Image (spheres, grey):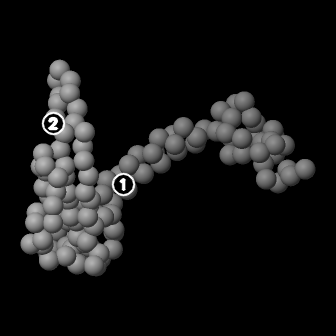
Amino acid sequence: MDHMTDNSKNKIFLETEIFRKESNKPITWKDIKHIEFQDDDKINIGFDEGFYSENNSWDPHYYVTITRNVLETDEQYQKRQEQIKLDEKWSRARQFKSYKSLKIKFEDSCKYCGSPTGSCTDVEAESCSENPNNLK
């Protein structure tokens, strides 16, 4: 199941694989005619030529997959909402950590050019080229 990213409070549609078949013979109508197709079903049919190596090999084969957008279940919705809350919590924690490290890095710097304290005095800061009051 492939989840579509959405932070909304409403239920969303998820792309769900409803049928899959692999065969060493071509896929025919009789293989899929039992499926009640909907207008927006996605059908992917193809042939894989195979691959051979010492460690990983597969034979040539035909395949078909059919996917459909299905409204998420109550359980999926609840799980997604919990994940959104957890992601927001972690994001805020990472942002705060970045903020603290940048604050420490720049709190003893010139507020205009970022030079370390001592290399740009207040008098120099007034003439600092980064000072927006000194537009030339």
Q: Is residue 24 above or below residue 16?
A: above
Q: Look at the numbered discs 2 and 1 and tell me whether their residues touch, using CB distance below 8 Å.
A: no
Q: What residue type is disc 1 on? A: Ser
N-terminal of the pair, mark 2 or mark 1, is 2
Spot occupied by residue 51 in the image (x, y as percentages of width and height): 23, 32
Q: Is residue 46 above or below residue 106?
A: below
Q: Residue furthest right?
A: 136
Q: What residue type is disc 2 on? A: Asp
Residue placed most toward the observer, 58 or 94: 58
Using residue 112 as the reference point, say whether residue 32 is left or right of it: left
Residue placed most toward the observer, 22 or 91: 22
Residue denoted by label 1: 91
> Residue 55 lies in what quarter of the image?
top left
Determine the CA span between mark 2 and mark 1.
45 Å
Q: Is residue 69 above or below residue 105?
A: below
Spot occupied by residue 130 in the image (x, y as percentages of width and height): 77, 45
Q: Secondary structure at mark 2?
A: loop
Residue found at x 72% / y 45%: 112
Task: Please identify, in this view, whether the residue under mark 2 or under mark 1 is nearer the observer.
Answer: 2
Using residue 113 as the reference point, say whether residue 52 is left or right of it: left
Q: Secondary structure at mark 1?
A: helix
Residue found at x 52% / y 44%: 103
Residue denoted by label 2: 59
Spot occupied by residue 76 in the image (x, y as percentages of width and height): 16, 68
Other-residue count near label 1 (Cα within 10 Å), few / some / many at <14 / 14–19 / ≥20: few
> Residue 56 lies in what quarter of the image?
top left
Residue found at x 78% / y 48%: 131
